[in-house]
Amino acid sequence: MNETIQHDDGRVELREDVAASLEASPIFNHDLAPTRVAQRTWTTYTFAALWISMAHCIPTYRLAAGLVDPKVGMNWWQALVTILVGNLIVLVPILANSHPGTKYGIPFPVFARAAYGTYGANVPAVMRALVACGWFGINAWIGGQALHTFFRSLSPAWPTLLGSGRLGGYLATEWVSFAIFWAINILIVVRGMELLRKVENLAAPFVLVMTALLLAWAIKRAYEVGHGLGPIMSAKNSFPTAGAFWKVFAPSVTAMVGFWATLSLNMPDFTRFGRSQREQMIGQVVALPTTMTVFAAMGVMITSASAVIYGSAIWDPVELVGKFPSRVLVGIAMFTVVVATLSVNIAANVVSPANDFANLAPRKITFKMGGVATGVIGVLMFPWKLMADPRGYIFDWLVGYSGGLGSIAGVLVCDYWLIRKKELSLPDLYRVGGAYEKVNGKAILATGVGCLLAWIGLVVPPLRPMFDYAWFVGALGSGLTYWILAR
């Protein structure tokens, strides 16, 4: 007896009686259950808006900062090409792992059960969740700083309202602003995915328009003050040879891939709500690489102009806007930063780990509980330290974790597209002892091989180039290993 309903467009859903029978399963809960076709309402615009709102964030704005840093040596256009290439590459695993979400209506940790086993899926889920916690903390800290500046625009006395003493180098009101922004994130998560969709749809055009206005002001003001856009836009190529450039370009592209390596795994968390494969694909292809590159370019131009206006380049837009003489302008700009950071943080860094933590014990942990756990762990990872050094942020944080996530991506793509030919038993993904093993040792071993290859360069200096290509080495190493073992 067929336990699923096959629709003409290729989408699959459980029969209602089968879904009801699975509710007693220890690995089932309503947050992880497959989305009904009637509930799959996200359009091309929804997916485009999702990526636009996620890309319009302070880490994207500052992404080129680490590349044009004198210690790295790229000029502005080399940095933008690097960002574009990295995002075109990461689009491939993003689309590959988006397909099962739309076809079966399943979130990432449930999709991972096919390759890793019904319990083994917790290994990639937790690996991905911990990285997301770090990102959540980073964006929550940035949002808190923007909120602090916003409050200062409303009341100049705000910074010292709780005294002028500092804890960890920051004022008490900065920590309060961080706590408030953190709480807003958690509140939206508790309200659910429909509120998230509305926030993303509204945030995308708002943030783009406001950043464009900031760019127009920066260009106008720079030409009034110094007849040009400044030293960053006029910098020449500083690499003596092509080989010297490649030594910087390769790890930089890996870092750009690492920037969205998290989403390359968990896009099923979003595409499970898609109306069709065509709509989710077009929305993502159109929005991701273009938005990332254009927004980074805006950041470069505004920063270069700031060097003319204020005498030194200011890469942090929160610091830059804080210099505006008008409190009204500062308030509007900081509200924009808060909206931008809020939209990316919830979509990119809370939805997936909330599902991942729920997957650890579906009968006890809900999506909401997983979201709160994400917020707590994110704070405990000291995000203010991760953001302190732009170069370390790119070449240590982004490159480092990309090797682990690439190793998971290699297994998932190989299993779904090459081994199973896109065919999954939907009800058995929610059964212990069904078509899928409890723990697939082959997938875990392959992931371990990929991680070893990606990270070995950290401890064996002659193999350092393998770490520079961490995501690629991890993905290819794990994918090939799994293909050999699975066949």
Image (cartoon, helix red, strand yellow):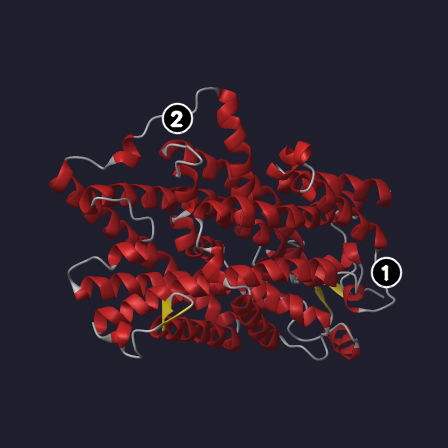
Q: Residue at x 68, y 62 (%)?
A: 126
Q: Which residue is identified by label 2?
A: 238
Q: Is residue 429 above or below residue 60?
A: below
Look at the image and tell me in which quarter the C terminus lies.
Answer: top right
Give the number of marks.
Answer: 2
Numbered disc 2: secondary structure: loop
Residue found at the very far front of the displayed protein: 165
Q: Nearer the viewer, residue 427 or 486?
A: 486
| Dot 1 or dot 2, earlier in sequence | 2
Residue type, numbered disc 2: Ser
Numbered disc 1: secondary structure: loop
Residue 206, given in percent of the width and then of the height, sits at 32, 59
Q: Residue at x 44, y 48 (%)?
A: 390
Q: Quadrant of residue 355?
A: bottom right
Q: Which residue is identified by label 1?
A: 437
Decide: few, some or many residues near mark 1? Use Cα within 10 Å; few <14, some 14-19, many ≥20.
Answer: some
Look at the image and tell me in which quarter the N terminus lies.
Answer: bottom right
Q: Which mark is residue 85?
A: none
Q: Nearer the viewer, mark 1 or mark 2?
A: 2
Q: Residue at x 48, y 53 (%)?
A: 44
Locate residue 81 relative to residue 164 in the image: left or right.
right
Locate residue 477 relative to residue 327 in the image: left or right.
right
Q: Would you say residue 357 is visible in this rendering?
A: yes
Residue 92, given in percent of the width and then of the height, sits at 59, 42
Residue 240, given in percent of the width and then of the height, sits at 44, 20
Residue type, numbered disc 1: Glu
